[in-house]
């Protein structure tokens, strides 16, 4: 199993656990894990960027579902933070590649 897959599963597990229990600095951990995953991504840049935007933009829509809505919103928001970290690293790598001679 690659580092990308292991970090991805850790990020998803932390996102789900963070929805049901208060984990101190969970968002910071998710962001750092997302940065690691973003550093290892070679292809699929557009897919990661769009996923980060959509997850962060539409996660609140699940609040309308009774009983489970807030949990789904929290899980999707946490996964959005994870994806945003990966997207940020992809953007930094692209900028570095363009600016370096």
Image (tube, helix red, strand yellow):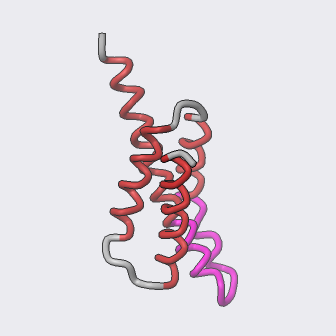
- Magenta span has 37? no
Q: Position of residue 17 (x, y in %)?
A: 50, 77
**Residue 21 image point, x, y percent:** 45, 85
Q: Residue at x 47, y 76 (%)?
A: 18
The residue located at (30%, 9%) in the rendering is 101
| Number of numbered callouts drawn | 0
* Span shown in magenta: 56-77
* Residue under the point 54% across and 42% down: 49
Q: Is residue 71 left or right of residue 101?
A: right
Say above or below: 39 vs 98.
below
Seen at 53% across and 31% down, the residue is 42
- Residue at the far front: name it: 1
Q: Which residue is nearer to you in this view: 32 or 56?
A: 32
Q: Nearer the viewer, residue 50 or 28?
A: 28
Question: Is 68 left, or right, of 45 in this rendering?
Answer: right
- Foreground pick, 86 / 66: 86
Rendering coords of residue 64 (x, y %): 66, 79
């Amino acid at each position: 199993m690659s580092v990308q897959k292991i970090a991805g599963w850790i990020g998803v597990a932390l996102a789900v656990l963070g929805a049901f229990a208060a984990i101190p600095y969970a968002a910071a951990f998710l962001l750092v894990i997302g940065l690691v995953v973003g550093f290892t991504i070679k292809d699929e840049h557009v897919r990661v960027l769009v996923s980060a935007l959509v997850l962060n933009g539409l996660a609140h829509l699940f609040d309308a579902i009774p009983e489970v809505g807030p949990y789904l919103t929290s899980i999707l928001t946490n996964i959005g933070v994870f994806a945003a970290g990966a997207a940020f690293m992809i953007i930094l790598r692209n900028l570095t590649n363009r600016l370096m001679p």
